[in-house]
Amino acid sequence: MSASASVTAFTRRTRHFTSRVVRASDVLRNDGLRALVQRATRIAYDRLDVAQLAEPLLDDDVADSARLDLDLPDVRPRRSEALTIGWVMTPPSAGSGGHTTLFRMVEELERAGHRCVLFLYDRHGGDTRAHERVIREWWPEIRADVRDAREGIDGVDACVASSWESAHVLARRGQSPMRRLYFIQDYEPFFYAHGAMYAMAEDSYRFGFRCIALGEMVAGVLRSEIGIRPDVTEFGCDTSRYRPLPDRNRTGVVFFARPDTPRRGYWLACLALQKFHDLHPEVEIHVYGSKVGALRFPATRHGKLSPDQLNELYNSCIAGLVLSFTNISLVPEEMLAAGTIPVVNDSAHSRAVLQNENAGWAAPTPSALAEALSTLVTRPDRAGAAAAASASVQTFGWTRAQADIRRIIEDEVYGP
């Protein structure tokens, strides 16, 4: 390279560096250190291809419905014989709602005398024993063995997938003869943009597993989108945990926050709560669930709460805000059971499951959600509304769903 070319290249690099320093100084001055660190992190995220870590499966664990040929057992066991039932899942985080529902089903099969095995699939190779400690601490009733699904899925009469990723893992790593089922709590293609993961999630329903839909929303979409007719069971609510407490003064509103879960509408909810605060600055806003960043309205942050702590919080609140843009969350009915009126984004999917006239339905816009909360905190008979909401929640809890799951699994293995 000539001397003049070297000087030109050096000058170009210097100008580029100076320009970036100026832009960084402007961000720091106008938006603060947090914004500067966020931008630097985003640049590093893009250049290091960190998005690849969001892929929930190793390449070899992606199954193809057009090429599956999975063996079934030649002989069915007698109904007098206890079964060994596997459950394939991602490792649970503390208090995970989806895992809590799944573990209720595991408990029921264990109460019926069957042995259960949890096959945990950690795409990043985490410590299975550490995951097991979380299970033992948060779901102490579970007696099931805990294994690493990457070491193979075998030694069971039947195995139940619990998500689209785990269905792929079961199809790829559960090659020995067994009965295969799929407990579907949501139509998971809706979790993604219409791309690769949407297609992989959708394909999981074509693997030939016996599908069990939680609620009519999931069942209806499986019929219309995939063309299968699943078994259907219904949502429950643990009314032994979520219930009115005596002598509680309800003054606030509560928000279930899941910033990293797009279907829970976190950004929209924050815009609505900002408008609600402008209307009612005297009403305390409580936020619980996942850790949240900076908020543009004052709020009391509770983080993760146990069911008993959560029931205490509900009993201090008039209303709650719970958004879900796929299958409805369990939270609205838990709020109702505790006498807290949930404001829910109105949709045909949500109404197919939450058929309760005490819930507050609103269009999914900031103003509509804020006005729905405002209506609830200013209604004259708040105590009567709380009592009616609690009384409206059916008291059989999860027993019907548990009985359905046990019957379906037993029929699949023993024969109907």
Image (spheres, rainbow, N blue to C red):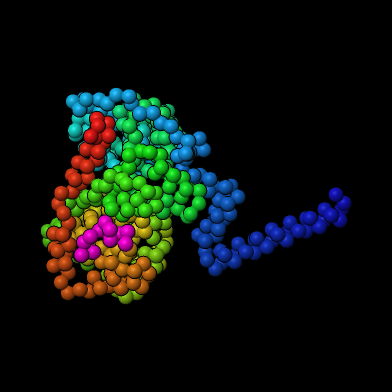
Residue at (47% x, 39% y) in the render:
66
Is residue 137 part of the magenta span, yes or no? no
Residue at (32% x, 39% y) in the render:
210
Residue 311 seen in the figure: yes
| Rendered image quadrant of residue 27 | bottom right
Q: Whole-percent x and y of residue 174? A: 40, 30
Number of numbered discs on residues: 0
Near-viewer residue (129 or 171): 171
Residue at (31% x, 50% y) in the render:
219
Left or right of residue 237, residue 30 in this image: right
Question: Please, which residue is most extreme toward the left here?
Answer: 246
Q: Whole-percent x and y of residue 319? A: 24, 65
- The C terminus is located in which quarter? top left
| Rendered image quadrant of residue 137 | top left
Q: Whole-percent x and y of residue 146? A: 33, 31
Q: Whole-percent x and y of residue 173? A: 43, 31
Residue 133 seen in the figure: no
Is residue 349 part of the magenta span, yes or no? yes
Near-viewer residue (369 or 288): 369
In this rendering, the answer to whether 396 lies above or below 35 is above
Residue at (76% x, 58% y) in the render:
12
Left or right of residue 104, residue 225 in this image: right
Near-viewer residue (72 or 348): 72
Residue segment shown in magenta: 348-359
